Amino acid sequence: MEGLRLEPLQEWQLPTLMSWLPDKQQCQQWGGPNFRFPFDQGSFLEDCRWPELPSYVLLDREGEMLAFGQYYQHLDRCHLGRLIVSPNHRGVGLGEELVTLIAQTGIKALGVAECSLFVLRTNLAARRLYDKLGFIQVAYPEQREWLDLCDFMVAPAEGFQ
């Protein structure tokens, strides 16, 4: 998609991101089962671990915020987390663009050969996107109390170059 750019999240953009999560279900689908809702700016910052984690926004040519995501190193992979497209811009391929650009950024920064992510089993749209991008479900090597709600998926870095 032409004119899109990935930039680090700025604090003034947080209210926009927070507005994309109007209810507990959407918040926990995005942030995981332990993300607090309702949230205020303080609890939101704590739970999404900004600026501790590399956090990015996808912007259009005019600077409008279209999507958000994070990455960090986990199990020797570039782990993608808290991926979301603005509710007003879904269904036009921005999810694919977001995942690809964040994966490319994280792979380069971390020097790893794979990406990983968790997806809630009920989030079928996200699951279709990750399947399309080459992620496959694998067994997660650790125990977590919420793993029965999620699938752990991995994709080779070459798929994002």
Image (cartoon, grey):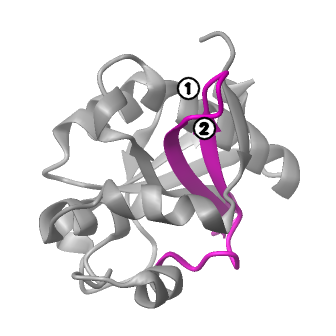
Viewer-side label of 2, 1? 2
> x, y percentage for residue 20?
32, 53
Q: Is residue 111 left or right of residue 104?
A: right
Query: Residue at 86% across / 53% down in the picture?
Result: 109
Residue 89 found in image quarter: top left
Residue found 66% across the figure and 46% down from its top: 114
Q: CA distance from mark 2 to mark 1?
A: 9 Å
Residue at 65% x, 10% y is 2
Give whichever of 43, 117 is nearer the camera. Answer: 43
Within the image, what quadrant is residue 158 found in? top right
Are the residues flagged by discs 2 and 1 in contact, CB closer than 8 Å?
Answer: yes
**Residue 10 position within the rendered picture, expressed as x and y whole percent measured from the top left:** 69, 61
Q: Which residues are magenta?
A: 48-77
Relative to 147, 131 lies left or right: right
In the picture shown, does residue 42 fall above or below 52? below
- Secondary structure under tag 1 reads helix
Badge 2 amino acid:
Leu
The image quarter containing residue 157 is top right
Report which residue position mark 1 lands on.
97
> Which element type, helix, strand or loop, lies under badge 2?
strand
Near mark 2 (Cα within 10 A), the count class, few <14, some 14-19 or many ≥20, is: many
Precedes in sequence: disc 2 or disc 1? 2
User: Where does label 2 land, which residue?
Assistant: 58
149 to 58, vertically: above or below: below
